[in-house]
Amino acid sequence: MEYGICLQSVVPVRSESSHRSEMVTQLLFGELFRIVGREENWRRIQLLYDDYEGWAHEAQITYLKEEEFIHLEQAVTPVSTDLVQLMIRESQNDMIPVVPGSSLPGLANGTLTIAGEKFIYDGAVSRDDLISMPPGAGKEAIIREQIRENAFLYLNAPYQWGGRSPFGLDCSGFTQMVFKLVHIQLFRDAAQQSTQGEGVSFLNEAMTGDLAFFDNEEGYITHVGILFDNNSIIHCSGKVKVDMLDHEGIYDLSQNKYTHKLRLIKRII
């Protein structure tokens, strides 16, 4: 088994081993993966974060020895929360733009070392302090409010199939990244995410931070968003935006019509 890490800002992961193939997801800085296949200059990778698979070009990945991969996998991993921040690569005296949700394994005192290179990061980060808090003391309310704030970080970000950054992301990429910022792991696709958490029976019981899922005419779940309360939702459709929600689905005031049919609500927190 071979292993790797992303040391670029955002790397496309494609459905096939071609630059012309559709992008199915993205690697962000610091994200680890296993290499499960090879085809010329392409590597089929499996992301450690969500087990998602796709093809990345060899020129855009960094190989790791198994020992370092395990070390970084087990390291405390803060997550970047600035809209854009610059990572300084000391050995080459250059900078790498870092987007929110990037992983910073082993970050300590503003520095981290990966694959023999030292990086300096002076931006804002989220640690897993909230998740490790004992139950009670308003823990859930704090996490829900943080999710609301994280969601607004992406407001007006454009829709891009397979995207996971503020410069373009899809509906499930949006929810995954918002939750990653509070160290709660979601699967990559909307249908996969709908299998997580506990069901909420009625919309009037929904709370900020719950996930709402929507299906198409064939009954397949194709869309997901984050509830702000039981009558509004933030989601990525065209762009990240806030719309009204009722028991039928999402109502877009700008179009004066329902755009998505509500299927179910899940509570992750």
Image (cartoon, rainbow, N blue to C red):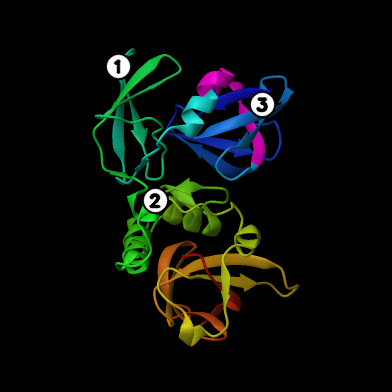
Residues under labels 1 and 3: Cα distance?
A: 28 Å
Provide the secondary structure element on which disc 3 rests.
strand
Q: Quadrant of residue 224?
A: bottom right
Question: How many residues crowd around disc 1 within 10 Å: few (fewer than 14), some, or many (20 or more)?
Answer: few
**Where is the N terminus found, in terms of image quarters?**
top right
Q: Could you tell me the amino acid type at mark 2?
A: Leu
x%, y% of residue 34?
63, 30
Residue lying at 37% horizontally and 48% vertically, measured from the top left: 128
Q: Of 234 and 48, which appears nearest the observer?
A: 48
Whether residue 134 is visible here, answered yes or no, is yes
Whether residue 20 is visible here, answered yes or no, is no
Residues under labels 3 and 2: Cα distance?
A: 28 Å
Question: How many residues crowd around disc 2 within 10 Å: few (fewer than 14), some, or many (20 or more)?
Answer: many
Q: Which residue is mark 3?
A: 43
Q: Which residue is mark 1?
A: 90
- Confirm whether the magenta stretch covers residue 222: no
Q: Earlier in the sequence, mark 1 or mark 2?
A: 1
Q: Could you tell me the amino acid type at mark 1?
A: Glu
Q: Could you tell me the amino acid type at mark 3?
A: Arg
Q: Of 252 and 91, which appears nearest the observer?
A: 91
13 over 89 or under it: above or below: below
Q: Which residues are the magenta region? A: 53-68
Mark 1 or 2, which is nearer the eye? 2
